[in-house]
Amino acid sequence: MLTETKVELAPTAALSVETVQSVHHWNEHLFSFSISRPDSFRFRSGEFVMIGLPGDAGKPLLRAYSVASPSYDEKLDFLSIKVADGPLTSKLQKVQPGDQIYLGRKPTGTLVADALLPGKRLFMLSTGTGLAPFLSVARDPDIYDLFDEVVIVHSVRRVSDLAYHDELSAKLADDPLVGEVAAEKFHYVPTVTREPFHTTGRIDALIESGRLFADLPSGHAFNPETDRIMMCGSMDMIKSLGAQFEAMGFPEGSNAQPGAYVIEKAFAG
Ligand SMILES: Cc1cc2nc3c(=O)[nH]c(=O)nc-3n(C[C@H](O)[C@H](O)[C@H](O)COP(=O)(O)OP(=O)(O)OC[C@H]3O[C@@H](n4cnc5c(N)ncnc54)[C@H](O)[C@@H]3O)c2cc1C
Ligand SMILES: NC(=O)c1ccc[n+]([C@@H]2O[C@H](COP(=O)([O-])OP(=O)(O)OC[C@H]3O[C@@H](n4cnc5c(N)ncnc54)[C@H](OP(=O)(O)O)[C@@H]3O)[C@@H](O)[C@H]2O)c1
């Protein structure tokens, strides 16, 4: 029987070559994996980077991915969709520990504390894989120095799409750095829109009904003076909620000019 020979990847000026350390499949649409992190790779929690595999004719096939681990972590975690006919993810979903992968050398992004003005509550609103950057931000100790309440809202179609549900429900209790402070300041609001669950309805509906704030110690609705918002996921959600936040008096922030809310689309399309 012929065995497939694996080609050694070569680093380039823009890409290092890393090793897959672990893989976890959540369901048929979603998986997470960890890779080695080069000493030279510096990023701010919440940023994204290009990753990839060899494409046709050996040229690297790259896509943007949010780093799902915090900036102090020795490895890099990612949360990925599996698109059946997706050029990258049709292959990426098959990676195994020991496999090689390209990692871009220049992370960037706006879902960072630096792009927000000082505030009291931080809301991270996500749909689907838009959760990824917030797994990074919520496990960064610095964020708990900046905010009194740190809230992840995750909207998905099905219960099995709630990746990291158990860790987030346990308020990151096993995290050696933030476990203690997160017990007091971190809050998780999962919602499932196409199956029965204790919380259902899209994020806009949860804002409208007040459900989004119901379990928070502060309890009150959005206030542009003290609330800061990060959004990642469905482009339609970002656009419509962004317009609502603007109307409420939240200015959009960027790295150049911090504001009251920041956005990143979780995928192009
Ligand atoms: C700034 C940024 C950050 C991103 N971070 C992540 C991330 O952390 N995790 C991740 O899985 N993807 C992320 N993406 C999307 C990612 O870049 C790829 O699109 C994805 O890996 C699919 O690649 P593909 O080549 O298989 O298919 P593509 O040809 O890239 O996509 C095919 C189609 O699949 C759909 N699609 C692609 N990605 C997603 C997604 N994440 N969720 C739902 N539908 C999708 C879209 O309709 C798209 O047109 C990010 C994209 C951007 C722009
Ligand atoms: N996850 C699955 O079970 C599944 C199954 C088959 C195919 N797929 C494929 O995977 C792709 C991505 O699926 P996904 O589930 O990650 O992403 P998605 O379709 O964007 O749904 C994720 C969450 O975002 C909500 N949402 C979508 N548009 C919104 C808007 N404008 N405002 C507020 N909330 C909004 C959805 O609510 P609603 O449910 O109300 O739309 C859902 O709760 C799909 O395009 C599809 O091709 C996924």
Image: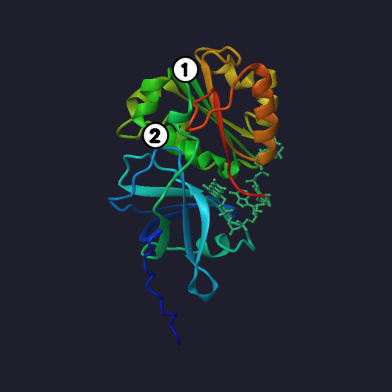
Q: Nearer the viewer, residue 40 or 76?
A: 40
Q: Is residue 87 left or right of residue 108?
A: right
Residue type at tag 2: Arg
At x 43%, y 56%, the residue is 23
Q: Position of residue 160 (x, y in %)?
A: 58, 44
Circle 1 — which element? Answer: loop
| Residue 201, visible in the rendered structure | no
Q: Residue furthest bottom?
A: 1
**CB of residue at label 2: within 8 Å of ligand 1?**
no
Q: Nearer the viewer, residue 84 or 245?
A: 245
Residue type at tag 1: Gly
In the rendering, which numbered label is found on residue 139? Answer: 2
- For residue 147, what is the image quadrant? top left
Looking at the image, is mark 2 or mark 1 nearer the viewer? 1
First in sequence, mark 2 or 1: give its number: 1
Q: CA distance from mark 2 to mark 1?
A: 18 Å
At x 61%, y 61%, the residue is 86
| Residue 203, visible in the rendered structure | yes
Q: Quadrant of ligand 2?
A: top right
Q: Residues within 10 Å of mark 2 (few under 14, many from 20)?
A: many
